[in-house]
Amino acid sequence: MHQAAIELIGINKSFGAVHANRDINLEVRRGTVHGIIGENGAGKSTLMSILYGFYQADSGEIRVNGEPTAIRTSNDAIAAGIGMVHQHFMLVENFSVLENVILGAEGAPLLKTSIAKARSELRRLESEYGLEVDPDAIVEELPVGLQQRVEILKALYRGAEILILDEPTGVLTPAEADHLFRILGQLKEQGKTVVLITHKLREIMAITDTVSVMRQGTMVATRRTTETTVEELAELMVGRRVLLRVVKDAAEAGAVKLSVKNLSVKDQRGVTMVDDVSFDLRAGEIVGIAGVAGNGQSELLETIAGSRHAASGTVILDGMPVDLTGAADPGELRRRGLAHVPEDRHHVGLVLAFEENQNAILGYHRQRRYLKGPLLNIEAILADAKDRIEKYDIRPADCRLKTANFSGGNQQKIVLAREMEQDPDVLIVGQPTRGVDVGAIEFIHKRLIAMRDAGKAVLLVSVELDEIRSLSDRILVMFDGRIVGERGSDASEGELGLLMAGVEQREAAE
Amino acid sequence: MDVFIAAVQTLDSTVRLSVPLLLACLAGLYSERAGIFDIGLEGKMLVGAFAGATAAAVFHSALIGIGMAILVSTAFAMIHGFASITHRGNQIVSGVAINFIAAGSTVILGQAWFHQGGRTPALSAAERFPSIVLPGAAAVRDVPILGPIYSTLISGHSVLVYLAFLTVPFTWWVLYRTRFGLRLRAVGENPAAVDTAGISVAWLRYRALMCTGVLTGVAGAYLSMVQNGGFVKDMTAGKGYIALAALIFAKWKPVNAMFACLLFGFLEALSIRLQGTPLPIIGRVSAQVMQALPYVLTVVLLAGFIGKAIPPKAGGVPYVKER
C-alpha cells in the first residue's frame, strides 16, 4: 500500500485579491499524527477546507492513498475516507447524539433502521477508541468536550480513515484536551491518520509525529517533531524570532486599588455563579484568576466591570464603594479609573460593523476632546486612532477600515489600545489572547507587564493556564463559583490543575 | 338542548374554518423548519384559490382545479426559493412581494378573463368537492348527544377537510420518522452541519418549499372550491398571517399546530355565531367588533400565553459558506 495517505501537489487558492494558498505541497503519511501550524490567516483552514471539499482549489492536485482524487464536495471527501472535526462544531444542537451522527449517512429513507444500526456501531466505536458518550443525550446539554467527541464519532461512523481536526483544543479545558490527545493516540494505533491544525506549539510538540508550518499562504517548512524545537517553530511561523517566555521582575505591590468582599452573583435562572468571593487587588501587581471556563470567572469579571449586578457583597474601587444594586454604570466606573477588556471582543468589546476609529473611542466618546459641541470631533478621533495604530502596531494601518476586516489579534489590540490608553488605575482583562497569534500574544503580554510596572493594578482572567502562570504575581483559582485557593506565580501546573478540577476541595470536605 | 345543538354547530363551523388555517400553518411549518421564513403563505393561498376556481370552472373538474391550484401555488413557492435560497435575498421582502403580486394579479386576471369584478364564475356542484357522509350518519342522527356529534361534527365534511386533518399525523411522521424530516429539521437549525454532512442545503430547502407550495395550494383550493363556490378578490383575508401566528403559537410542532388552528378557527366561528346576538351584561355589540375579535385575541394570545417559543435557529438567514 502507498505510504502517503494524503498528498497535496501545487495547491493554489485565491479569494479575490487574497492569495490564501500559494503552491502548497504537503505529504501526510499513513498512521501518523501530522500537525499543521501557522498564525491566523496563514491559510491552514483554507487548505483543509479544500481537502474536505468545502472549497475548490484554483489549481493543483489531491492524491488520497496515491490515487489522484477529485474532491468537489464534502461528499467526495467522505467517500475518499476523509473526515473533519471543525473548529466551530457542525452539530445540530437540539438533536440527540444519535441523530447528529446519522445525519447525512442515514442509509435508508426511514430512520428506524438507521438509528438501530448507528446505536450498535456507536457502541463498537465507544469501546474501540474510548469515545464514551450517551447516544440519546441532547447535544446542547453536553459540555463542549463531549460535543467534540460527537464530531469525531460522526467522522468515524462515516468510515473516515483520515481525520482532520481544526483547532480542536481552543474550546477545551486542559483535562479535556488531554483526553482528546489520548483518543487521537488510540486512533493512530488503529492505523488512522490524523491531521491536526493548531496555533498552539505545545500541542504540536506533545502529540504530532511530523509538523508542517504555514506562513502567509505558503508552506514554509516540514519537520519531524522530534527534530525541532518550540523556538524554531515559532520563528518559522512568525518569520522572526519570538520571545515565548515573559520576562518580568518581581512585583512591587502598593496600595489596595480594588477590593472585593463577599461578592455573590446569580444568573438569570437564579443559579449562583459567583459564591462569596473576596480578594484585594493592589497597585503594581497582576492577579490572575484561573479556572475551567464556566466556573464563575466571567460573571465575576462582568460584575466588577458593572455590566451585571450582584446578589450581595461589596466592591470597593480606590476606597469608594461601587453601586452593585442596580447594574453599576460602566461609564461611571470608567471615569473612576477602571478599564475593562471584555472576554468576548466580538459581542461586547467591539461593534464589528463600525470603522476602526469609531471602536477606538467607544465608551469614551463623551470625553470632551472627542466632541465639538454636540457633534463628534472627527479630526481628533482620527488623529487618536492613527496614533494608537502606530503605537500598538495594529495591521492593516487603516483607521477607516471596518473592524470586522481585522484579524482576531488586531481586533484584540484595538480593544487593548482603547482601554490602556485611558491610563486607568485598575485594568480588568478577560481572555486577552483568545484566538490571537503567537506574535500578537507576545506583544499583548509585554503590554500587560508594562501596565503593571507603571503601577497599575491588573486583574487577569484566562482559561489558558500558561498565560496565567507566566503573567500573574498571584493566582486565584475559581471552582464552582468560589475561590478555592491562592498560589504564587511559582505554582506548578499540576497543582493548579487539581485546584481547577475541584479535587482538593472535595478531599477537604471528606 | 338548543344550547347543545348550537354548541355542536359552532364546533362544526370551527372545523370548517380551521381547515385553511391548518393547511397554511403546516405549509409554513415545512418551510420554517427548513429555515426559510415564509410570510408569503397568504399570497400562495390566494393564487391557489384563484387558479383552482378558474381551472375548475373552465375544465368543469374539481380535480383539475385542485391540481392547478397546487401547481400555481408551488410555482410561487419556487419563486420565493429562487429569491431567498439561490440568490440569498431577504426572505421577508420576497414573501411580501409574493403577497402583493398575488393580490394584484388574481384580480387583474380574473377581471380580464371573466369580467365579473375579479370574481371567477360560480362553480357547480360537479366542479366542487363532494362532502363525505360517513356510514351510519343518517341512522344515528336522532340518538341524543352522540347522534348530532357524529352526524354533524364528524361526518358530512368535504374530502379536503379529512385530508387536512390527516396531514397532521403525516407531517409528524415525515418530520420525526423519515430521513427527509431529519434533514429538514437539521437544515433549519444548522445548515452548515447539513452541508458538511454532504447534503445540498439548497436542494433540501427547495424540497421543503415544494411541500409548502402543495399545502398552500390545497388551502387555496379549499377556500374557493369548498368554502365558497368560486374565487372572490382577497378571499384569504389575512388567513396566511393568522396561520403564521398559529405556527409560532404551536412552537413549530405539527400536533400543536392543529390545536392552535382549531383555537383560531373556534374564535372565528364564535364571532360569526355571536354576530347580532345580544351578549349578557355588554348587550348588543356591532358586527365589526365581533369580526375583529379573533385578531385581537391572536395578539393577546401571542403576547401573553405562548411562553418561550424558540424558532428554528437558522430561520431567515440565507446560507452562505463562511469564508
Image: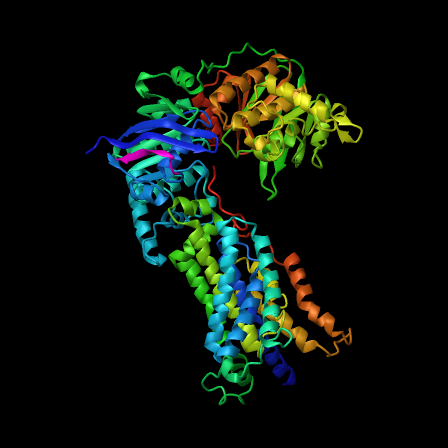
Residue that protrudes farthest toward the right in the picture = A373
Where is residue A66 drawn, in percent x and y?
A: 24, 34
Q: Quadrant of residue A183?
A: top left
Give the answer, above or below, for where A450 lies relative to B295: above
Residue A167 visible within the image: no
Q: Quadrant of residue A162?
A: top left
Could you say which is closer to the camera, residue A222 or residue B73? B73
Where is residue A410 drawn, in percent x and y?
A: 55, 25
In the image: residue A189, left or right of residue A90: left
Where is residue A369 drawn, in percent x and y?
A: 75, 23
Residue A392 visible within the image: yes
Where is residue B192 drawn, in percent x and y?
A: 45, 44
Task: Name the residue rendered at 38%, 56% in the picture.
Answer: B179
Give the answer, above or below, for where A274 lies relative to A213: below
Give the answer, above or below, for where B62 lies relative to A392: below
Q: Looking at the figure, which quarter contains the N terminus of chain A? A: top left
Could you say which is closer to the camera, residue A344 or residue B228? B228
- The residue stretch that appears in magenta: A56-65
Specify whether residue B101 is painted magenta: no
Could you say which is closer to the camera, residue B313 or residue A74? A74
Could you say which is closer to the camera, residue B308 or residue A8? A8
In the image: residue A473, left or right of residue B134: right
Specify whether residue A61 is painted magenta: yes
Which SS type dominates the magenta stretch? strand
